[in-house]
Amino acid sequence: MRISKHKTLLAAMFVFAAGFASASSAQFNPRCDGCMNTYDYCMSKPDAEQWLCVHQYNVCAQRAGCLLMPEI
């Protein structure tokens, strides 16, 4: 009984490590960071409207090949 618990724990740790490795191996795109800075700057304004900031981000992100935010 005790050996099967260790095998299960080892398998779970392996799956977690594999997922973490694949996520961290994705290449960083500095242009995506710039698009996020644009979004953050837009949202920092006192009269900011989220839908407009998301749209500005998506325009930038689409040109840079980054993930898009859902527009509501």
Image (spheres, grey):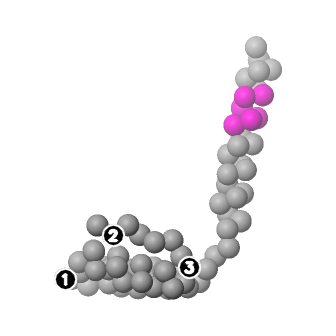
Q: Secondary structure at mark 3?
A: loop
Residue 46, picture quadrant: bottom left
What residue is shown with label 1? Answer: 47
At 74% from the left edge and 35% from the top edge, which residue is drawn?
11
Q: Which residues are magenta?
A: 7-12
Precedes in sequence: disc 2 or disc 1: 1
At 72% from the left edge and 32% from the top edge, which residue is drawn?
9
Q: Nearer the viewer, residue 40 or 59?
A: 59
Precedes in sequence: disc 1 or disc 3: 1
Q: Amino acid at mark 2?
A: Glu
At 67% from the left edge and 51% from the top edge, which residue is drawn?
19
Q: Is residue 28 magenta?
A: no
What residue is shown with label 3? Answer: 65
Query: Are the residues at dot 2 and dot 1 in contact (C-beta closer than 8 Å)?
Result: no
What residue is shown with label 2? Answer: 71
Which numbered circle lies on residue 15? none
Q: Is residue 11 magenta?
A: yes
Compared with 53, 4 (above or below) is above
